Image (cartoon, helix red, strand yellow):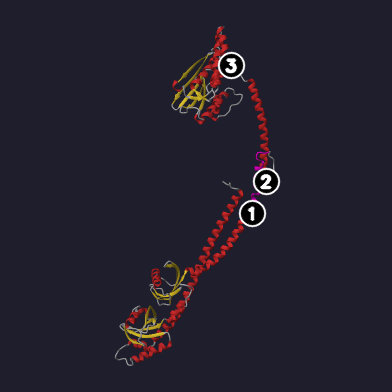
């Protein structure tokens, strides 16, 4: 498996960062351009829709003005107040049609003019529309809505000649509420349709006229399913004046802009496929990708050059270290002026110097070790030879009835066997007590039995393993500092018993007690594992045993020191009963 290099890691890291920044910048740019184009498309379609409505409204206004003038003429108002009354002279149909004809000549977009009285057609200029159509048109608004001004009805009908038209309604004022006379001005929608058909914003775009409920009255589209889908969408949207929105028809997203046409309840709606608006993004996006790709390639080259230059001193140092592997080491000069590189080279040179010093020291120690081993072989004494010598001394003492010499020699041989033959750090409590007994036997002969010894041991714990040589130093300390200075005969006791989850080992004597201040100092030293002063020989042995307990039992073992005139001096060791020994 090929190992990674620092140069490769730095290059890959920088390229990843550049790639992430590039992708993020492209994504943000694309979204910004996309939304900007959509917003511009919405503004443009809204302006176009407003202009279209303004043109249609201009056409409507001329017709509405002519209709209002006709309705407000004195003759027509008088006719409305006294319509079909016997006492009114000059109410022939010819005179009425003459008045309507004059209005029709004033506006070439008028297709027909009709009078409807109480829902019944009573007069018509060209009689192009049946009574049912005129009645439907008149009933679209309340009389109060068209009494003061004329309004176009957002319903499109065909005349008898097949011409599509819209109608404008105006009620004629009458003193009698029962006289409901209305003027219906019908205009051809060819001019309006030509305005709608001029709206060409690209493939599948167009315009339509709808009423307030979203029902399409006319559309430039010829696809019936598309018209049905658009009508369903507009009905659901409940279009309003100035509304612009995005929605889908048959899976294609369209931009819609709707504006009201005057006060006619008609809406001009322009629809443009969104892909028509965003099509220029493709070309712009290709240009952006070319620019970004070029910049990314340059960034990659700069990154490789930068990482190569930055890691060159480190690579030289690495190569030098590989070449010096297994050979004589030597310092090298930095290959760069950067502070970090100089520190690295300086540290390496210091390491080389220290390594050479250590190698020289190691060689000296090896020579001294070989010399010491040679001397040890020259002066080595076989332990078995020593045991046999002690046995010979013991035999000669027995032959000459030197019982004390025999006992001391036997005790010394036993003590040495227990000390030299045990290689492990943990021994059974039984063997530890044998070692203590052998030591005490020698001391009793030395001090001519100036003290009495007693052992109180729980036999159930004799096989429990303890750290070797933790009782003998305590016994030695008790004899040397407690019983030896005492003039009269003293007593020494060794106890071992179980107490709950603890094994308790105690050494007690009734010799010279320790002063209270020293007792406090020893207790603090034992608790803090503090080494006593070299002059305080009384607690050196206690410190050594305490350190062995801490070393092998960690915080699970502890030792305590007590001394007073009433109870004598007692040293207690507590070790856990559940530890079998040998675990540190």
Q: Mark 3 against mark 2, which lies toward the viewer?
A: 3
Residue with the mark numbered 2:
342
* Left or right of 321 on screen, residue 225: left
User: Residue 64 falls in which quadrant of the image?
Assistant: bottom left
- Who comes first in sequence, dot 1 or dot 2? 1
Q: Which mark is residue 349?
A: none
Residue at position x 64%, y 51% from top? 308
Residue at position x 58%, y 61% from top? 292
Label 1 residue SS: helix
* Left or right of 193 on screen, residue 122: left
Q: Are marks 1 and 2 in contact (CB under 8 Å)?
A: no
- Who comes first in sequence, dot 3 or dot 2? 2
Residue with the mark numbered 3:
386
Label 2 residue SS: helix
Q: Position of residue 75 (x, y in %)?
A: 37, 89
At label 2, counting other C-alpha atoms closer than 10 Å, the crowd grade (few under 14, some 14-19, many 20 or more) is some
Q: Position of residue 62 (x, y in %)?
A: 44, 83
State whether residue 67 appears in this view. Answer: yes
Q: Which mark is residue 305?
A: 1
Q: Position of residue 147 (x, y in %)?
A: 37, 81
User: Residue 367 falls in which quadrant of the image?
Assistant: top right
Span of residues in magenta: 309-327
Alpha carbons under labels 3 and 2: distance apart: 64 Å
Residue at position x 61%, y 24% from top? 535
């Amino acid at each position: 498996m090929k190992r990674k290099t620092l140069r490769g890691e730095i290059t890959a890291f920088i390229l990843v960062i550049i790639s992430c920044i590039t992708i993020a910048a492209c994504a943000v740019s694309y979204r910004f351009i996309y939304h900007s184009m959509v917003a511009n498309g919405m503004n443009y379609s809204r302006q176009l829709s407003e202009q279209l409505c303004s043109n249609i409204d201009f056409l409507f206004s001329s017709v509405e003005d002519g209709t209002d003038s006709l309705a407000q003429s004195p003759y027509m108002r008088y006719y409305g107040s006294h319509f079909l009354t016997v006492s009114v002279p000059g109410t022939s149909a010819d005179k009425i049609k003459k008045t309507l004809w004059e209005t029709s000549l004033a506006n070439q977009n008028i297709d027909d003019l009709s009078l409807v009285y109480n829902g019944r057609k009573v007069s018509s200029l060209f009689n192009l529309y049946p009574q049912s159509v005129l009645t439907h048109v008149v009933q679209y608004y309340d009389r109060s809505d068209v009494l003061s001004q004329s309004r176009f009805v957002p319903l499109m009908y065909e005349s008898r000649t097949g011409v599509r038209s819209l109608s404008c309604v105006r009620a004629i004022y009458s003193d009698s509420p029962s006289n409901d006379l209305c003027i219906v001005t019908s205009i051809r929608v060819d001019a309006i349709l030509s305005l709608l058909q001029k709206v060409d914003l690209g493939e599948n775009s167009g315009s339509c006229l709808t009423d307030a409920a979203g029902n399409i009255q006319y559309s430039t589209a010829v696809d019936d399913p598309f018209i049905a889908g658009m009508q369903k969408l507009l009905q659901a949207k409940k279009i309003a004046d100035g509304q612009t929105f995005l929605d889908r028809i048959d899976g294609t997203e369209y931009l819609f802009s709707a504006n009201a046409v005057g006060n006619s309840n008609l809406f001009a709606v322009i629809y443009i496929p969104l892909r028509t608006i965003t099509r220029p993004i493709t070309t712009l996006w290709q240009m952006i990708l070319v620019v970004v790709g070029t910049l990314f390639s340059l960034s990659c080259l700069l990154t490789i050059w930068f990482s190569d230059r930055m890691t060159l001193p480190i690579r030289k140092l690495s190569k030098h270290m590989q070449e010096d592997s297994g050979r004589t080491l030597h310092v090298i000069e930095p290959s760069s002026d950067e502070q970090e590189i100089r520190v690295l080279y300086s540290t390496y040179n210091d390491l080389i110097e220290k390594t050479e010093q250590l190698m020289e020291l190691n060689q000296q120690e090896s020579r001294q070790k070989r010399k010491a081993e040679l001397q040890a072989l020259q002066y080595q004494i076989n332990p078995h030879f020593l045991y046999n010598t002690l046995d010979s001394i013991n035999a000669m003492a027995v032959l000459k009835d030197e019982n004390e010499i025999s006992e001391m020699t036997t005790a010394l041989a036993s003590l040495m066997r227990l000390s030299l033959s045990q290689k492990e750090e943990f021994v059974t409590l039984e063997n530890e007590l044998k070692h203590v007994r052998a030591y005490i036997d020698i001391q009793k002969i030395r001090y001519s039995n100036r003290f009495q010894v007693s052992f109180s041991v729980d036999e159930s714990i004799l096989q429990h393993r303890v750290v070797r040589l933790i009782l003998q130093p305590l016994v030695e300390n008790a004899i040397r500092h407690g019983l030896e200075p005492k003039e009269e005969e003293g007593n020494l006791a060794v106890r071992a018993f179980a107490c709950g989850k603890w094994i308790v080992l105690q050494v007690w004597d009734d010799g010279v007690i320790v002063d209270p201040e020293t007792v406090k100092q020893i207790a603090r030293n034992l608790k803090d594992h503090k080494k006593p002063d070299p002059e305080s020989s009384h607690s050196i042995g206690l410190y050594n045993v305490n350190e062995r307990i801490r070393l092998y039992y960690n915080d699970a073992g502890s030792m305590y020191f007590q001394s007073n005139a009433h109870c004598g001096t007692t040293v207690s060791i507590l070790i856990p009963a559940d530890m079998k020994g040998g675990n540190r």
